[in-house]
Image: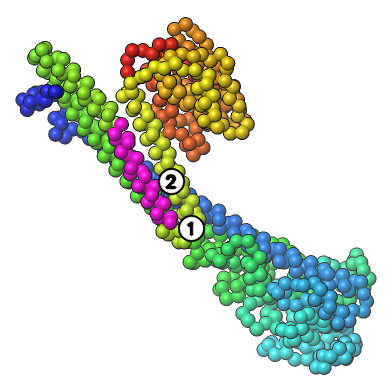
């Protein structure tokens, strides 16, 4: 039985700043306060870090979807110009295309629904007007005539002018009846595009217009393709003026084009609003889509998160501005940062509680040491009893470390289950990013669980009784290599000269397993070679584990054998930081020493340790 100190003994003088086991002392409370402060700061920092990460992932996701949508719109425009080129090819191939032939040809193109119409616009001089009107009536359009729109919006017969550009052929006819016969030369916007196309010889898009056949609330635009006499485009502007036959015309509705592009995309873009502006148009006339947005320029859209893409086609520059909608996931607040901060506070609380218990035990041990020292000065006869008490206290501390490390695994399992339940219960409400971050949190909990396993194994060294057996180290290394199952491309060379000796098999196996595992884990290439060899030095055997990995800077050779020290980020190499510390302690317990051989600028590392042929007569 161990003697307990009497109240009188506890009232003896102590060092300055040290109180009795039940009193208060900054010497023992300060570490706990620091742990709480650091844990609080780390949790808050993690909150902001995760918030920034969530924002970064969200912004990247938005930019990808917005880019897909912009590319889809551009693809629709390119497809529409391709259809127009086909119309020009039809008239280049024939000098006399009938209305029926035009209809059959357009039907064969299978154009998309966002194209309101594909039309043929002949150049009609004043003297030719009656002939064109009569021919159209013979085709079945009994009320056909050339028309124009008044300033009040009414459709009336076209006035007298030198030449006309009427909508003569149109497909589909249904829905475009009002446009048949309409003289595009009567509209300043349309006429400007016509003349530009005629002069350039290429495709020209108009500014925004309200279509004659428009029944909804959206702008339209036109693309003109000039058609000349003969198959080739005249080289001079004067010849192009003289030889112009007419124009192939594409009529497009902006709302239908954007809707078609959204359906074409492979991703859900419902949380993104799209605004399209014609930067070639005059100020105040640039908005193309949506018609009722109220914004006349991209600079006036109030959104921090946006993607701006410019499309150049047919002589115009369109600017597509994508912003998050008001109720989209890109503007919502994520719960993951708050969850991380709360978990950080919980872990800090557990750590502070654990440290406080350890420090209280230490304070009790320190008080007991001082008390026993005072008694030793007064009564030398109690020396052996005091030493026994100190030994018991040290054993209690080591045992407590083992128990505390073991008991911390339970709350960790609880945290892992809590995260799993949250994901399962709210899976339909959580974004993919939140699910991803929850999985990352579980990975970190698993890493801490592995760290506690390392601590448990580290603490067991102090309570393990060594049993020596005959060990075939070559067979042992082969078993380790088979257990580790290195990735394809890695070769483990085991020397045939490895000895058989009588020692602690678990201890030697722990050392070799950790060294070979580290050589694989920290290798920076997909292929590598690891070799295990030995050398008989008489009283000891020198074992060496070598690899052709990246090497270790000599300045870190001592640091790597300290607990919780790693050279590679834990995000890249999943490690507890306890393996080499366990190796160093085990080798020391066996009466040996471990060294690292690696040079700056050269690849490869060799870990060599000595192992006595007869285990020291002490407990590890």
Q: Residue 448 vs residue 472: left or right?
A: left
Q: Measuring from the top left, give residue 526's x and y in whole percent.
A: 61, 33
Q: Nearer the viewer, residue 203 or 11?
A: 11
Question: Which residue is at 42% across, 49% downward?
Answer: 48
Q: Measuring from the top left, give residue 569's x and y in whole percent.
A: 48, 35
Q: Residue 333 vs residue 241: left or right?
A: left
Q: Measuring from the top left, give residue 515's x and y in whole percent.
A: 49, 24
Q: Which residue is mark 1?
A: 431
Q: Quadrant of the C terminus?
A: top left
Magenta segment includes 123: no
Q: Quadrant of the N terminus?
A: top left
Q: Measuring from the top left, give residue 282's x and y in whole percent.
A: 66, 70
Magenta segment includes 404: yes
Pointer 1 or 2: first along the chain: 1
Look at the image and give the residue range highlighted in magenta.
402-424
The 10 Å Cα crowd at callout 1, few under 14, some 14 to 19, many 20 or more, is: few
Cα separation between marks 1 and 2: 17 Å
Secondary structure under badge 2? Answer: helix
Secondary structure under badge 1? Answer: loop
Q: Residue 125 vs residue 56: left or right?
A: right
> Can see residue 17?
no
């Amino acid at each position: 039985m161990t003697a307990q100190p009497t109240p009188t003994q506890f009232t003896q003088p102590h060092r300055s700043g040290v109180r009795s086991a039940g009193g208060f002392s900054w010497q023992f409370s300060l570490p706990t306060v620091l742990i709480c402060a650091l844990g609080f700061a780390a949790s808050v920092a993690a909150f902001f870090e995760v918030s920034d990460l969530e924002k970064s992932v969200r912004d990247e996701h938005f930019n990808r979807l917005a880019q897909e949508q912009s590319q889809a719109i551009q693809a629709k425009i390119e497809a529409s110009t391709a259809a127009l080129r086909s119309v020009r090819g039809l008239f280049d191939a024939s000098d006399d295309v009938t209305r029926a032939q035009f209809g059959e040809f357009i039907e064969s193109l299978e154009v998309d629904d966002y194209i309101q119409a594909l039309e043929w616009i002949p150049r009609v001089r004043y003297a030719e007007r009656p002939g064109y009107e009569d021919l159209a009536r013979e085709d079945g359009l009994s009320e056909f005539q050339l028309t124009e729109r008044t300033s009040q919006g009414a459709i009336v017969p076209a006035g007298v002018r030198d030449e006309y550009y009427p909508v003569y052929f149109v497909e589909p006819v249904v829905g475009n009846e009002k446009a048949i016969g309409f003289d595009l030369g009567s509209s300043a916007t349309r006429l400007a595009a016509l003349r530009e196309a005629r002069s350039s010889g290429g495709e020209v898009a108009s500014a925004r217009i309200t279509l004659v056949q428009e029944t909804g609330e959206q702008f339209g635009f036109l693309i003109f393709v000039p058609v000349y006499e003969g198959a080739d485009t005249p080289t001079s502007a004067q010849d192009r003026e003289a030889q112009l036959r007419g124009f192939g015309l594409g009529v497009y509705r902006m709302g239908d084009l954007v809707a078609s592009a959204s359906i074409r995309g492979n991703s859900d873009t419902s949380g993104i609003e799209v605004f399209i502006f014609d930067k070639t148009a005059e100020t105040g006339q640039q908005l193309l889509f949506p018609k009722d947005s109220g914004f006349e320029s991209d600079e006036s859209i109030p959104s921090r998160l946006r993607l701006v893409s410019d499309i150049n086609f047919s002589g115009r520059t369109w600017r597509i501005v994508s912003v998050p909608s008001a109720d989209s996931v890109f503007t919502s607040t994520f719960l993951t940062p708050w969850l991380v901060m709360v978990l950080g506070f919980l872990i800090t609380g557990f750590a502070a509680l654990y440290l406080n218990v350890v420090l209280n035990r230490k304070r009790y041990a320190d008080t007991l040491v001082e008390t026993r020292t005072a008694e030793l000065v007064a009564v030398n006869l109690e020396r052996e009893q005091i030493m026994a008490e100190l030994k018991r206290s040290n054993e209690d501390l080591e045992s407590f470390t083992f128990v505390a490390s073991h008991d911390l695994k339970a709350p960790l399992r609880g945290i892992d289950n809590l995260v799993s339940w949250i994901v399962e219960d709210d899976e339909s409400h959580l974004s993919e990013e939140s699910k991803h971050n929850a999985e990352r949190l579980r990975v970190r909990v698993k890493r801490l669980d592995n760290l506690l396993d390392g601590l448990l194994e580290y603490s067991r060294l102090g309570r393990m009784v060594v049993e020596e057996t005959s060990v075939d180290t070559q067979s042992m290394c082969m078993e380790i290599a088979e257990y580790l199952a290195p990735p394809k491309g890695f070769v483990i060379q085991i020397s045939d000269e490895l000895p058989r000796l009588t020692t602690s098999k678990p201890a030697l196996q722990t050392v070799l397993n950790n060294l070979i595992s580290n050589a694989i884990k920290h290798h920076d290439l997909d292929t590598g070679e690891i070799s295990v060899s030995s050398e008989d030095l008489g009283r000891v055997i020198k074992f060496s584990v070598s690899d052709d990995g990246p090497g270790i800077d000599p300045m870190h050779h001592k640091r790597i054998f300290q607990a919780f020290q790693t050279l590679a980020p834990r995000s890249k190499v999943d490690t507890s930081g306890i393996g080499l510390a366990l190796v160093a302690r085990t080798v020391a317990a066996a009466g040996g020493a471990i060294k690292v051989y690696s040079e700056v600028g050269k690849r490869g590392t060799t870990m060599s340790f000595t192992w006595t042929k007869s285990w020291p007569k002490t407990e590890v």
